[in-house]
Image: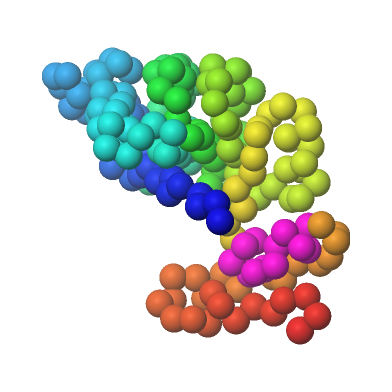
Amino acid sequence: MAITPFIGTIHHAANTYLLEQFLRDSINDRTGQYGGSIVNRARLLLEVVGAVCQENGAGRTGVRLSPLTTFAGSAAVDSNPMALYGYVVEQFAPLGLAYLHVIEGETAGARHPEGFAPPFDYEALRRRFPGPWMVNNGFTCEEGMEAVAAGKADMLAYGRPFISNPDLVRRFRENAPLNELRIDKLYGGGAEGYVDYPFLGD
């Protein structure tokens, strides 16, 4: 029996968690080697990823990024996200990571939020990384297949649809309707709204 090796993801490089707070000039007002320039602001993330790769192996380590997520308010986006995340992705490129997981647009919101001139270029970012490229954020099955077919992604991540559809892969395959997510039950601390959604045929 083949055993799939564990792959750990550094999620806190996204969604305005601590590592991403260091990245963004809208939040990071430090001086010294961890503040100021893009190189300095990216230093902590790169050090953390390097340490995890050394312990876990780069091929068993993934990183998640969310260049345009504004959980901390719209002012939390970096003043030049394309330059910032372009640099970060370039530093990841030679490491041999298991994958890079990029949230397109606003987490749980628009994939192409307004107010960025020029618009953020995910395809240009993707070209800088030679390894597996994963995207997510509200993709339908058809949109995900189109993204892979067009070379915009190697794989898709589906979060909320998997919560409400334990048989999501089958539903996609059979073009079956999806259960509606009960958002009011998220983060409730109990089983309701997590493990009680029906399977096809129930």
In which image quadrant can residue 123 be found?
A: top right
Q: Which residues are magenta?
A: 161-172
Please check the rendered image and state whether residue 53 is part of the magenta-colored stretch, yes or no. no
* Residue 136 image offset from top left, x and y in percent: 60, 44
Residue visible at 69% across and 47% down in the picture: 139
Foreground of the two, 156 or 74: 156
Protein image colouring: rainbow
* Residue 144 image offset from top left, x and y in percent: 73, 43
In which image quadrant can residue 59 be found?
A: top left
* Residue 80 image offset from top left, x and y in percent: 44, 20
Residue visible at 72% across and 71% down in the picture: 179
Q: Quadrant of the N terminus?
A: bottom right
- Above or below residue 200? Residue 79 is above
* Residue 102 image offset from top left, x and y in percent: 53, 36
In the rendered image, is residue 160 in sight? yes
- Above or below residue 65? Residue 130 is above
143 left or right of 36 in image = right
Magenta stretch secondary structure, dominant: helix
State how many labels appear: 0
Residue visible at 73% across and 35% down in the picture: 147
Foreground of the two, 118 or 171: 171
In which image quadrant can residue 145 be found?
A: top right
Task: Name the outermost residue toward the front.
Answer: 1
